[in-house]
Amino acid sequence: MIDLAAYSPAVQAGALVGTVLLEAVALYVGYGTVEQVAKPLVERITHT
Amino acid sequence: MALFGIALTMLALFVSFGFMVGVLFGFFGMGGSFLVTPALLVMGYPTRVAVGSGMAFVFGTAVIATLKHRDLGQVDYKLGGLMVVGTTAGIEVGSHLVYSLEELGLAGGVIGVTYVFLLGGIGVFVSYNALRSDGADDSGGGHHEAANRDIDPDDIPDIAKRIQSYNVPPMMTLSGGLEVSLWMILGVAFATGLLSGFLGVGGGFIRMPALFYLIGVPVPIAVGTDLFEIVISGGFGAYTYGLNGGVDLSIVVPLLAGSALGARIGSAATSVVNEDDIKIYFGLMLLGGSVAVAFQQSAGYLGMPVLDTIGFVLIMLSAFMVSGAVIYNTITTMRARSNASATAAD
């Protein structure tokens, strides 16, 4: 684990924004994958 | 039981609240600072943490919603970049106006009244226009190719047509083949930034209608481009608050987990729900917000904290009802389309 407390506030703030950006992109990709898997299933259910 | 140092009930609350805000954010390109910061303040977080964490959350949600709108071809990067330039200058001037009013001892009153009337005014204007034109174009949503498709001149509001008629070079070509003077775009961006800086708000509720009514950009592209601008301003805001330890990741992470799903649904809904319906929901959301802010402003003047609580409950209720209506409308529209295509196949 990287100890960010040792770095300057600018680096810490940059790492914080980077973490949020990374989480956002990961969630976007993750939910996108779930959507691709679930979509045909939902369509099959609604058409039966 | 706790996860990441937060009780599970709190975690569930953050995820569900994030989901609701995500739907509204993806659908309208607004609602972040409007909802999250007051909610965190009510939960007892210090102002710096509530504003900073709210800002970081708005940044993350805007990234997700913008990515989804990009997939649907609903982000005009050139327009977004120009808007950022004009808005930044406007915010700077707006904040100086606030300092001047503070010196005169008038800041609180003038800002409060302007905020209430602006929210209510835009809400009434947008709802009235949408209700007036509702039924004239019942083609439904279906704006998947919004950015590539040429815009029907009948869809452009009269004010936007007038602004587009000023041929002051250099002229910029925007999504859908729109030709608008660079100076007009910068002027609109400056005006929205001025109001945003003056009121101390993110400004999505001003920018989205400004992009549609003043520049003539179709609603889904207005939402997508507004969100792109929020990515930049939200990222900068989160960084600024992060410098002073104002961002708490234990708040942002669960909120974002919920809003990521909500923002996907909200963003996708703009290409399903009828454009006029989007405007009606947007107007209703602003009207609810206007009444709520009026209650909160009155609380300070009348010395009645209960009005502040009523205002907060009203904001949450209107947000809950509008996000529910967006999801309901999306599901019913998709069902109707599915039934229509099944009947056509028969």
Image: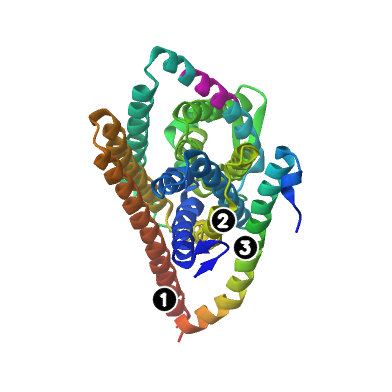
Tell me the distance, in whole angstroms, between the alpha carbons under discs 1 and 3. 32 Å
| Residue sitting at x 43%, y 33% | B158
Query: The numbered mark 2 sits on a residue in which chain?
Result: B
Residue situated in front as seen by the camera: B307 or B303: B303
Magenta stretch: includes residue B92: yes
Magenta stretch: includes residue B286: no
Q: Position of residue B134 (x, y in %)?
A: 34, 50
Tell me the distance, in whole angstroms, between the alpha carbons under discs 3 and 2. 16 Å
SS at mark 1 in the image: helix
Residue placed under numbered mark 1 in the picture: B339
| Badges 3 and 2, same chain | no
Rendered image: mark on residue A27: 3
Residue placed under numbered mark 2 in the picture: B250
Q: Say which quadrant the C terminus of chain B sits in.
A: bottom left
Q: Which amino acid does label 3 sit on?
A: Leu
| Vertical position of residue B267 compared to residue B95: above or below | below
Looking at the image, can residue B136 be seen? no
Q: Position of residue B245 (x, y in %)?
A: 61, 41
| Vertical position of residue B41 compared to residue B273: above or below | above
Q: Looking at the image, is mark 1 or mark 2 earlier in the sequence?
A: 2
Quadrant of the image occupied by residue B299: top left
SS at mark 2 in the image: helix
* Magenta extent: B89-97
Tell me the distance, in whole angstroms, between the alpha carbons under discs 1 and 2. 44 Å
| Residue sitting at x 27%, y 28% | B301
